[in-house]
Amino acid sequence: MQYLMAIDAGTGSVRAVIFDTKGNQISVAQKEWIHLEVEGVANSMTFDVEKNWDLALWCIKTALKEANLQGSDILAVSATSMREGIVVYDKEGYAIWGVANVDARADKEVRYLKEAFEGIEEAFYAESGQTFALGALPRLLWLKNNEPALYEEVAFVSMIGDWILAKLSGVIATDPSNGGTTGIFSLEKRDWSPQMAEKVGIKTNIFPPVLETGTVMGNVTQHAAKETGLATQTKVVMGGGDVQLGAAGLGVVKEGQVAILGGSFWQQVVNIKSTIKPPKDMSIRVNPHVIEGLSQAEGITFFSGLIMRWFRDAFCDLEKLEAKERGVDTYAILEEKAKSVPVGSYGILPIFSDSMNYGKWYHAAPSFINLSIDPEVCNTASMFRSLEENACIVSAINLEKIKAFTELEIDEIVFAGGASKGDLWCQVLADVTGCKINIPKVTEATALGAAMAAGVGVGVYENMVNASESLVIWDKTYSPNDSNHKKYQMIQKQWDEVYRNQLALVDRGLTESMWKAPGI
């Protein structure tokens, strides 16, 4: 039997996952990591390349041990990572500084770029599909302004997944899906746009080669083999961004296919041709896909999964006790109770994430609107259902925004992530969107996507599309209830109007935004 390894560098942890060539997960090892705020640097989230490499090494070695495999059993290794997080290197290829995707230290730089270069964000967005909110240009400008000596040493920049592959192969490169999230990139050309850096006074010679996902970068070096336990004959293969490789791991690899990834944040992604221009209103993000010729229009719903965790831990002690007694998950208890709550949750409207507004990205204050003092109407079950409904409603609005500029019709959605384990949540998503919902039988879609990339590199699979269609297995489907869909369309309109009014309270300084992008 032959095996493939995927290394997944997420926002909160790093994992090494081993699959066989049929897509079966053999072992996984995971370590949490923390991105620390630098003293005196507000909203900074530094990526510690020294400490975090040690954690990655532990995961690689432990995954091999748990699988009872030798390094020589691994045909190829690839990596995926949180997007937007960057690492910079000196001329010797040594990583000297990094930031995680959630780093927001460059607030002043974002404001400066918008004020000093009128229309620059709109122009760059039209080419790259990205705004400055999470982009690399403001962060590199921050480094230039605040750490000039360190900035002078910068010879290369890459993404965090690329950094892992560089540590293994000695080759610094990036792929379109991950590199594209820097915003210094052309969606159509699937390559860097150094002229963007030149316009704002950033070095133009720091951008490494761009390799398509599934391209062999080289072999594991002797030094990396000693560190990791992998073999020097193991191929190192270019990976990609976590959402895009996750989409491949869910079978979303052709034009017009759609996925909703229901994790801590929810992403709604739609595959579109690379030639389609981002919307002029800058409402939706557009990223290169891991499939050549395709991009992904992406909506993001903030904190949907984290809000559920907060609600469970803050209000559901009785359900926790019941779950413990019955040996089931607390969310399963909450869904059982919420099934008896009618569509619309007695009018409760949660105000958390707004629909996507990428050009001016901020949210209203967290709240529940339209609560009742009748405990039979307003209780943990109805509030829980209202949160499930709300995540689906915001997703539907984001999909409508994507449909508006792509002119695509959407009638099927792949739903994955922790939220897709909830039977009620899946049905609510079908009813809200009016679409058939397909649930894949996979627990590690992002890592599986990276393993597919590794397999493509060594010829196990012909290409990413072939790999995806060969390995993705379907578990369940949910069909929409037409009557419920009509009710949710009315609720969606009501929620949208209420949210606008709640956002106005933030604008007036009467309430505090749940989250604001840098520069807002």
Image (cartoon, rainbow, N blue to C red):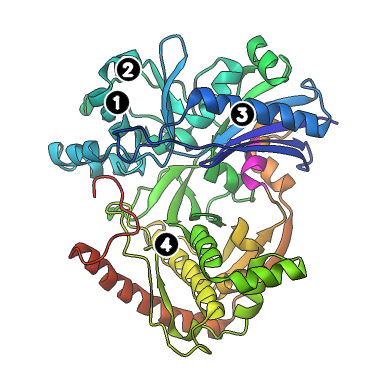
Q: Amino acid at mark 3?
A: Ala
Q: Which residue is mark 2?
A: 150
Q: x%, y% of residue 51?
A: 53, 26
The structure residue drawn at horizontal position 42% and vertical position 60%, both measured from the top left corner, is 407
Q: CA distance from mark 4 to mark 1?
A: 34 Å
Q: Earlier in the sequence, mark 2 or mark 1?
A: 1
Q: Earlier in the sequence, mark 3 or mark 4?
A: 3
Q: CA distance from mark 2 to mark 1?
A: 8 Å
Q: Secondary structure at mark 4?
A: helix
Q: Earlier in the sequence, mark 2 or mark 4?
A: 2
Q: Amino acid at mark 1?
A: Leu
Q: Earlier in the sequence, mark 1 or mark 3?
A: 3
From this view, report whether residue 234 is shown above or below residue 466.
Answer: above
* Residue range (magenta): 444-450
Q: Which residue is mark 4?
A: 398
Choose mark 3 or mark 4, whichever is in front.
3
Q: Secondary structure at mark 3?
A: helix
31 lies left or right of 114: right
Choose mark 4 or mark 1, whichever is in front.
1
From this view, report whether residue 328 is shown above or below residue 224.
Answer: below
Q: Which residue is mark 3?
A: 56
Q: Amino acid at mark 4?
A: Asn
